[in-house]
Amino acid sequence: MTSTTFSTDEKRAGRGSGRGRGARRGPAWRLWHRCLRSGTFRTLGPFVPVVALWWLLAALEVFPESFFAGPPAVVDKFGELMEKGILPGYLTDSLTRLCYGVGFGLLIGLPLGFAVAMSRVLRLACWPILLFFQAVADIAWLPIVIVWFGFSLTTVTFVIVYTIVFPLMLSVVAGVEQVPRELVRAARSLGAGRLRVFLEVIVPGALPSVAGGIRTGLGYGWRALVAAEIIVGTSGVGFMMFDARRVGDVSQVFLGMAVLGTLWYALDALILAPFERATVERWGMVRAMEADG
């Protein structure tokens, strides 16, 4: 009892002394910790030094103005293209192509991934092919795809689908492999058939990995979209950047990069990351059970 009391008193004293040290660190320290607890600061704070350095390099004219546009020039170009309706139109075209590619990519990648994961024969037959095409860059397909489909939406959609399907399939296979075999045997011992085991054990257990695969695949698809628009596009943000290079408008190229990064960051932070986090929280009990075992 005495040792327990002493340890408790020591812990309280330690917490008290810690609070005392925090109080003695002054208002600047407390302000910093308050900022760290702010979601807005954690989101926008890391970009402040990047923009400040960008602004400083442009103001000091470290690089010629024709090669390096500063934030004021990019903001002016943003207002100009928004007023003319050019940027909204290009953004709409890019997002439409992305939606087509992602939709077809998910429709193809998810069923094929589960089929390969659940069938030993398909796994042995298809695994070398998956690894081979995973290593072939999407841009390498553009020459032959242009011959097949021309400069069309089909060409861009093909490239995005190709980029998404293989990472997604590999994530599905990895997710199915993470499902503990004990859960499958327990479900079968309780009388569950193959379909019920698949729907109620395999799929929920693989969902955390599948969610991560979707997030990764969309990131690859976004970059493939921009590359395809630069090479074969007649509209879209990638085409806007390439066309600006042709006329020597560096500020428009910088604007395209800023728009692409901002749009993807917002898409990932508002949709993909919460989706993955919610999936892991909802179905992550398989990993927890496996760790406990």
Image (spheres, helix red, strand yellow):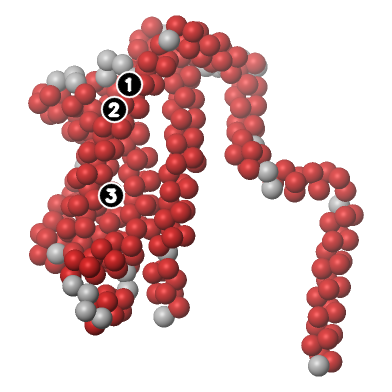
Is disc 2 surrounded by few (<14), some (14 to 19) or many (20+) residues within 10 Å? Answer: many
Q: Relative to the observer, which residue lies in front, 200 or 41? A: 200
Label 1 secondary element: helix
Q: Which residue is mark 2?
A: 97
Query: Closer to us: mark 3 or mark 1?
Result: 1
Q: Relative to the observer, which residue lies in front, 20 or 61? A: 20
Label 3 secondary element: helix
Residue 137 showing in the rendered view: no
Query: Closer to us: mark 3 or mark 2?
Result: 2
Left or right of 290? Residue 161 is left
Residue sitting at 37 percent across and 40 percent down?
Answer: 219
Is disc 1 surrounded by few (<14), some (14 to 19) or many (20+) residues within 10 Å? Answer: some
Q: Position of residue 156 (x, y in %)?
A: 23, 28
Give the amino acid at mark 3.
Leu
Residue sitting at 35 percent across and 12 percent down?
Answer: 243
Label 2 secondary element: helix
- Whether tag 2 and tag 1 are in contact, CB under 8 A, the answer is yes
Q: Which residue is mark 3?
A: 168
Q: Which residue is mark 1?
A: 93
Is disc 3 surrounded by few (<14), some (14 to 19) or many (20+) residues within 10 Å? Answer: many
Left or right of 160? Residue 45 is right
Give the amino acid at mark 2.
Arg
Q: Position of residue 160 (x, y in %)?
A: 26, 35
Q: In this picture, is 74 found above or below 275? A: above
Left or right of 99? Residue 77 is right
Quarter of the image where the N terminus is located: bottom right
User: Which of pointers 3 and 2 lies earlier in the amino acid sequence?
Assistant: 2
Q: In this picture, is 102 found above or below 89? A: below
Calculate the distance from the C-alpha at mark 3 to the C-alpha at mark 1.
24 Å
